[in-house]
Image (cartoon, rainbow, N blue to C red):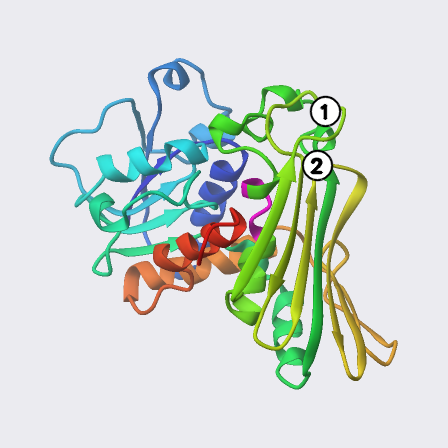
Amino acid sequence: MNALFVGLGSIGTRHLKNLHTVAKNCGIPLEVTALRSPGGAATELPPEIDGLLDRQLSVLDSGVHFGAAFITNPTHLHAQTIERLKGRVDTFFIEKPIFESADHDLDALGLGEAQKAYVAAPLRWTALYAAVQEKLAKMPVYSVRATCSSYLPDWRPGADYRAGYSAHAEMGGGVTLDLIHEWDYLAGLFGLPEVCYNLRGKFSHLQIDSDDLSVYIARYKDFLCEVHLDYFGRGYRRELEVLSEAGTLLADFGSGRLTLPDGSTEDYGEDGNQKYLREMAWFLGYAVNGGESANSPRHALAVLRTALGEEI
């Protein structure tokens, strides 16, 4: 497979390593090109990353075509990158969120129904998510509460949080976009809400210009849903609470622990990279064999509209 990577930050390098691991296990030969910005190309990559690339370019030849392209650069560059690659890629892997705004025309960008494409949705590949999905099939829901609270300066040890894209709204940073995981897995479990209201803004001491708090209340047909996202919570908390007639189901995505309505617990803890490996294994199968996208651009755009508090 001839694969292209656009963006080799932390998530891009993770996907690059996992692509090699999964392709090797599946017996799929790889040839990997990195398209780097002129400024980025002047910076030498670590040897362990450089060794996974067959070539690094700052400009693509006009006739080159790729079996797969990984769009893992900053969110605000996704649309222009995809447009540049229009008609030159068999299957896209687009890091979440798909775009920085919901104003983009998928057909104009070449992401219509005929184009194979997947938008990253890593929490949906956890063992815990699969367990929650199974339990919910037998559980009438009254109310749902999703929380993701963490301290942005602790996200990337050794890096200045003020310099990262998360700190800058114009780069697609801010909890509303950065933590779209919550709306993604909620949409996977329950579909999209009928009505969604959102309040967001910058409220903490953090030296950023993006939103550090985003709070939602949404109405589904038979229940209400609350979502809380922030950058300033000390300690990591990522939980889903589902209240039903039988009691409360609590899924802790940090620990992998699932607490059932009767108070008993089940442990689905696993290495953090496992969900990405499952995701990559699915993606390679999709790229080679086809089928239905597990998270199409059209669905991802609808989730983005919900996250932005726009009309569904």
User: Relative to residue 294, is residue 24 depicted above or below?
Assistant: above
Q: Nearer the viewer, residue 214 or 53?
A: 214
Residue for point 39% across, 13% down: 42
The residue labelled by disc 1 is 206
The residue labelled by disc 2 is 231
- Is disc 1 in contact with disc 2, using a CB cutoff of under 8 Å? yes
Residue 179 is covered by the magenta coloring:
yes
User: Relative to residue 285, is residue 11 depicted above or below?
Assistant: above
**What amino acid is labelled 2 in the image?**
Tyr
Q: Is residue 231 left or right of residue 52?
A: right
Distance between mark 1 and mark 2 Cα atoms: 9 Å
Residue 150 x %, y %: 74, 40
Q: Nearer the viewer, residue 253 or 107?
A: 107
Residue for point 86% across, 81% down: 262
Residue for point 39% across, 14% down: 39
Region in magenta? 177-181
Q: Nearer the viewer, residue 297 or 284?
A: 297
**What amino acid is labelled 1 in the image?**
Leu
Q: Is residue 286 left or right of residue 21?
A: left
